[in-house]
Image (cartoon, rainbow, N blue to C red):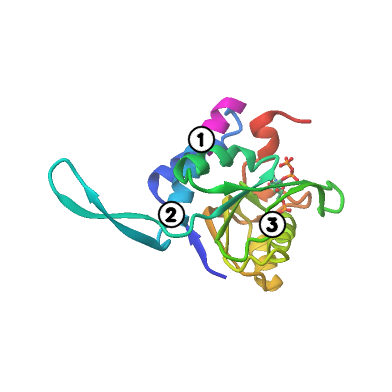
Amino acid sequence: MDVLVVDHPLARARLTTMRDARADNATFRAALHELTVMLVYEAMRGAPVTTERVHTPVARTVGYRLANPPLLVPVLRAGLGMADQAHKLIPEAQMGFVGLARDETTLRPTPYLESLPESVADRPVLVLDPMLATGGSMAHTITLLTERGATDVTAVCALAAPEGIRHLEESGLPVRLVTASVDERLNDSGYIVPGLGDAGDRQYGAV
Ligand code: PRP
Ligand code: URA
């Protein structure tokens, strides 16, 4: 699996703000918003474009548009904090939604929402979730997408654990990963170490 680590100084700075346990919910959300812009920007590098003529106030030249805007799929809850920023960067994108809650004991994802187009055979997909831990939630989401024909999926995650990357590699699913960091490991509770804690709770408060 292709893994792109966006280790730009600005991405590192936003991730540091997110890691800091002293950051309040608003500060954490703002840092995730800004990091999302950087991750999506890099995820879209190399996307095919169409060309068109454009008249500037001065001259004629060649302009560019996305040839095939992606479907954006935030994984609720935590992925919601990436959805608006990704959509601002790619306003022509459509958005689908998947809702999953990880069972604290088994660490398996429990699905509670699935709102996806019938077919995604003909377009790229960006799955937005700040955390790739065991990889169970991401693998579940990508399986839903491949059942609808997806063959070109990018997981956009603030943080990833080696265990989650291995899970995706072994799944054989058609996915590449764009992330700001591959951390050390998971702890016994399935949290990424050093990580940033529970990304949903850090944004919205504990439920
Ligand atoms: C978090 C996170 C991922 C998942 C990652 O969501 O946003 O979806 O855990 O863990 P995994 O790789 O081991 O599956 P969580 O289930 O805590 O729900 P939330 O977004 O509602 O907080
Ligand atoms: N989900 C989170 O929100 N954080 C982790 O560290 C692991 C899974």
Quadrant housing the N terminus: bottom right
Q: Dot 3 lies on which element? A: helix
Q: CA distance from mark 1 to mark 3?
A: 22 Å
Q: Quadrant of residue 28?
A: top right
Q: CA distance from mark 2 to mark 3?
A: 20 Å
The first of marks 1 and 3 along the sequence is: 1
Position of residue 131 in the picture relative to residue 57 (left or right) = right
Q: Amino acid at mark 3?
A: Met
Residue 90 x %, y %: 47, 46
Please determine whether, in this image, residue 9 is positioned above or below residue 62: above
Q: Nearer the viewer, mark 2 or mark 1?
A: 2
Q: Dot 2 lies on which element? A: helix
Q: Amino acid at mark 2?
A: Glu
Q: To which residue does mark 3 refer? A: 138
Is 31 contained in the magenta span? yes
Q: Amino acid at mark 1?
A: Ala
Q: Nearer the viewer, mark 1 or mark 3?
A: 3
Span of residues in magenta? 24-32
Label for residue 42? Answer: 2
Label for residue 60? Answer: none
**Residue at position x 71%, y 28% in the image:** 205
Does residue 121 appear anywhere in the picture? yes
